[in-house]
Image (spheres, coloured by chain):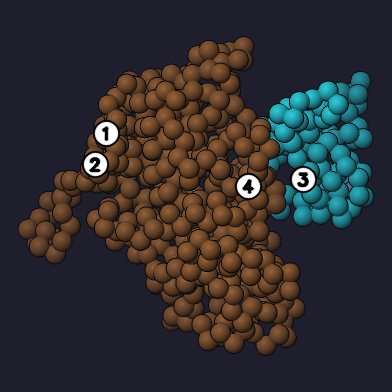
Chain colours: A cyan, B brown
Amino acid sequence: MLLVPCPHCGPRNSADLTLVGESESRPDPSATTPVEWRAYLYEEHNPAGWTRETWYCRLGCGRFFVTERHRGQNRFRNPPLGAPDESARRR
Amino acid sequence: MARRGTGGAEVQPGRRRRPRYPARYSAAALLLRGKRPWPPIWRSGDLRDSYDVVIVGGGVHGLATAYYLASNWGITNVAVLDKGYLGGGGSGRNTAIVRSNYLTPDGVAFYDRSVQLYERLAVDLNLNVMFSRRGHLTLAHSDGALRTMRWRAEVNKHQGVDSEVIGPAEIKRLVPALDVTGAPRYPILGALHHPPGGIIRHDAVVWGYARAAAALGVEMHQNTEVLDIATSGGSGSDGKGPGGRVTGVRTNRGDVSAPVVVNCTAGWASLIAAMAGLRLPISTHPLQAAVTEPVKMFLPAVVVSGSLHVYVSQTDRGELVFGAAVDPLATYDTGGSLAFAEELSGHVLQLMPGLGRMRLLRQWSGLCDMTPDYSPIIGPTPVDGFHCDVGWGTYGFKAAPVAGEQLAACIASGETPDLIEPFTLSRFAEGRLVGEKGAAAVGH
Ligand SMILES: Cc1cc2nc3c(=O)[nH]c(=O)nc-3n(C[C@H](O)[C@H](O)[C@H](O)COP(=O)(O)OP(=O)(O)OC[C@H]3O[C@@H](n4cnc5c(N)ncnc54)[C@H](O)[C@@H]3O)c2cc1C
Ligand SMILES: [Zn+2]
């Protein structure tokens, strides 16, 4: 079982959430060519290391959030948005 | 179109080359040989610093491509590199289901050719690959599913593939263990019956291709990891990416130059493509499977239920082999989960309540390279000389013969054969996806 750190609910079983995918900023639809748009739609980095992803807390708070996960080892890092920032706490 | 990638080697199609093996295995040979060791069935030796073709990935796809390059085209200055052992990826972990009852005409034609090649593979490779054509049943639990099956059956028959929708009585006759009473939560309303489908011995296919390719001169290099791909002239700042040309690979055993590099790494395909500066429409998901203790034969066909995310077949040793849909979470971790075993068992009992006391012996997991349209990516890429045979998801084992045969033709002739034209990488940029989800998601 993988515990996903939801910034709103705390750690939850990954079965409660949906991995939406790699988070990338969406290009402006009015300024992109079809080829660029399709690259945004279909291409993936799919790394075996760290990547930024969007999650949907489906059976919990129902909110979307962004976090970083190591796809080889299934570890999370960088407290997700909304959680206290390490460096801020040290100061 | 210019001939691509054979490094100027003379291409000789048409004449098939037959492998000559260093030793013949037979009862007489066993007596004559006594205690003398058998020669290894593929050669290894030193990694040379140049080849005409380097194949990354020693699974069934890499090995089939190597074999058809050598046997159909006489291109034998070829090295197959694998970071682990031959067949250590999905090729040694799959549930070995072979069928051709897909949904799109492109898919049906392609997989049908593969089944044809599998039919004579034992003869071609001179090795018993134990192809058991026991029939393949895809169950329908709803009117909607039944409609899709009728559609699939008509597409299949139109292309000469044996496939028909049957009702509960006929299902019960074929597989008495199934509960067709209509009582379960997912009643069995009908099934798509595909008599030519079946299972095959996956390790034998891997070893057979490796042995035959090696006998024709191809070198196998295990424990040889590709760390980078050398390219020149690409659009990226490092000379990689579209518009460039491949010149070789860097491995943990040294640099190798080659005008053609083939990516046959399935679950790892994105990592190899990134080394050439390309992004693929692939995400890597684990697929789990499990096997029970052996019991007497009672399950004569392969049974698949898409709604229940489960499929099952019985091996010649009597074990039940179960599979499912891929894990929803994209990851390279093959640890597996208890949740899988629990869910699987529940679903199996829905279909065959009589199995309540069977024990699971083990479960395992392998990496699958999923594409958005449940179809493979085969052929040339925007980096000249860099070919792909990836995106095999959960259905690549059955496709290895046709993919290897057609990709070899593509590399040798520089032209993309009709059978793989629908599956080239360019389809994503051109917006012509294949739409095979209905027949590929759990069906394998
Ligand atoms: C549990 C399970 C059940 C399945 N059931 C079926 C089925 O019933 N029917 C079916 O048709 N398909 C099935 N599949 C899918 C099928 O197994 C795969 O699609 C197929 O085996 C892919 O073969 P391949 O040769 O492309 O890749 P693989 O066999 O995965 O080989 C890829 C190889 O690349 C090597 N590699 C990776 N990175 C590097 C590197 N950097 N350098 C060198 N080498 C590298 C790996 O070591 C590996 O050996 C199943 C898969 C799984 C996991
Ligand atoms: Zn939450």
Can you identify the residue that label 4 sits on? Answer: B434
Q: Chain of mark 4?
A: B
Pointer 3: residues within 10 angstroms few (<14), some, or many (20+)? some
For label 3, the SS is strand
Which of the 4 image quarters holds residue B24? bottom left
Q: Nearer the viewer, mark 3 or mark 1?
A: 1
Residue at the spot 59% in from the left edge and 55% down from the top edge: B104
| Residue type of the residue flagged with mark 2 | Arg
Chain letter for mark 2: B
- Which residue sits furthest front? B158
Judging by the rendered image, the residue that carries numbered circle 1 is: B12
| Viewer-nearest residue: B266 or B74 | B74
What x and y, as percent, mark residue B382? 55, 25
Write down the chain letter for disc 1.
B
* Label 4 CB less than 8 angstroms from ligand 1: no
The amino acid type of the residue labelled 3 equals Leu
Instruction: Check if mark 4 and mark 1 are on a common chain.
Output: yes
Q: Residue at x 39, y 44 (%)?
A: B405
Residue B179 in which image quadrant: bottom right
Residue B199 visible at all: yes
Residues at marks 2 and 1 touching, judged by CB atoms closer than 8 Å: yes
- Tell me which numbered mark, 4 or 1, is placed earlier along the sequence: 1
| A41 w.r.t. B231: above or below | below
The reply to the same-chain question for discs 2 and 4 is yes
Judge from the rendering whether residue A87 lies leftward or rightward of residue B420; answer left or right.
right
Task: Give the mark nearer the N terminus: 2 vs 4.
Answer: 2
Mark yes or no: residue A70 visible.
no
| Separation of marks 2 and 4 at Cα, in angstroms | 34 Å
**Residue annotated with mark 2:** B15
Q: Amino acid at mark 1?
A: Gln
- The subunit carrying tag 3 is A
Q: CA distance from mark 2 to mark 3?
A: 51 Å
